[in-house]
Amino acid sequence: MPIIWRAGSRNTYSKGNNDILHKSNSINETHPEWEVFLDFTVKELQPVINEMLVHATMQLPQDTLSAIKEAHARETKDLARKQLEAILTSANLSELEKLPLCQDTGLVTLFVSGELANHTDETEKALTHAVQNMTSKGAMRPNVVHPLTRKNTGTNSGLNEPEVLVDRSTKKTAMKMILKGAGSENFTNLKMMVPTASRQDLFKHILQVVIDAGGKTCPPNILGIGIGGSAIQAMFNSKLALTREIGARHPDPETANLETSLLKAMNELGIGTMGLGGDTTALDVHIETAGTHTASLPVAISFGCWANRVAVAELKGERFRIVR
């Protein structure tokens, strides 16, 4: 018997037949002989994806907002402090007035994992419908164009957009959505370093990429870095890293140490908010790694601007809940 997703209260999406849910906390408690599996259809996925898109477009994750407030509190440069005040005021107005955090509502990427890895077609259809609906209402700027003719699709869809990618780094059934505008996306960097490159070589390269970007990525940034794997894997991981909560360190101590060392070094560059100087160039640095070829060392870097627009929904027991 399939378990079906049903819209619940705000930010919560329940699964199962309503009568069964009210009679028991688990279908198997009443009918242990039933084989239960998840049946993700467009209709059932649509409400949570709609809510995620609205959330990501118009509201900063709480951890990002808190990090900007902390940066403002410790900022010693007057101009940078005023810029951070403007960012906080803008973010507050976006949430109150239900307006986009930035006029460039970007391209939408959705990472899916766990049971959803087997339902990418359904997920893509639901995501496409959500994006088209938001665009038609004027809540998202139509950004998607043909790469050669530059003809706009007018719907933020088509030509393989929006994209759904499968994250196999976790078994957790979840969706991680990120919206990236061109300002930060245009400074994405991939370098195939020599396998003999030292940690110092790696460190210098990453800092140089940040220096070259300057204020064009709308700092303070979140820096996502993919190290290892194939070139494609490194690029994938660098964007996936941007969906991690600020302050969450990599479980590997050596990688975590590199994250904190890079964050400290970036904030000593003096690039500051919007590139106008200041104490905070980055809010955090997140690194994801993968095993790589003995003769390779790919390093990919993705920038998240201060408006790092992320929404995360996870399967929590019998509920699909937006957790970030």
Image (cartoon, rainbow, N blue to C red):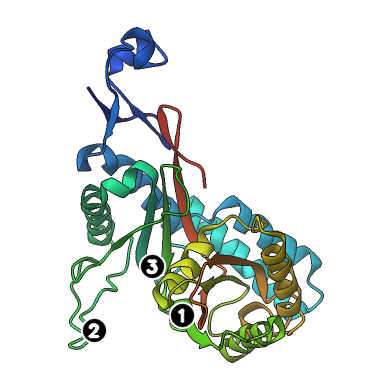
> How many residues crowd mark 2 within 10 Å: few (<14), some (14–19), many (20+)?
few
Residue most extreme to the front: 294
What x and y, as percent, mark residue 212? 58, 91
Dot 2 corresponds to which residue? 147
* Residue 289: numbered disc: none
Q: Residue at x 44, y 51 (%)?
A: 55
Dot 3 corresponds to which residue? 105
Please indicate whether residue 261 sits to the left or right of residue 291 in the image. right
Q: Tell me the kind of residue under disc 2.
A: Pro
Q: Are marks 3 and 1 in contact (CB under 8 Å)?
A: no
Mark 2 residue element:
loop
Q: Is residue 99 above or below residue 186?
A: above
Between the residue at mark 3 and the residue at mark 1, the CA separation in whole angstroms equals: 11 Å
Of 284 and 233, the residue lying toward us = 233
> How many residues crowd mark 3 within 10 Å: few (<14), some (14–19), many (20+)?
many
Between the residue at mark 2 and the residue at mark 3, the CA separation in whole angstroms equals: 18 Å
Dot 1 corresponds to which residue? 183
Please indicate whether residue 158 sits to the left or right of residue 164 in the image. left
Q: Are marks 2 and 1 in contact (CB under 8 Å)?
A: no
Q: Are marks 2 and 3 in contact (CB under 8 Å)?
A: no
What x and y, as percent, mark residue 30? 34, 8
Tag 1 or tag 3, which sits nearer the N-term?
Answer: 3
Q: Tell me the kind of residue under disc 3.
A: Thr
Query: Is residue 253 visible in the rendered structure shown here?
Result: yes
What x and y, as percent, mark residue 75? 78, 71
Q: Residue at x 21, y 85 (%)?
A: 150
Q: Is residue 11 above or below residue 291?
A: above
Of 35 and 91, the residue lying toward us = 35
Between the residue at mark 2 and the residue at mark 1, the CA separation in whole angstroms equals: 17 Å
Q: Residue at x 27, y 21 (%)?
A: 35
Dividing the picture into quadrants, the one containing residue 148 is: bottom left
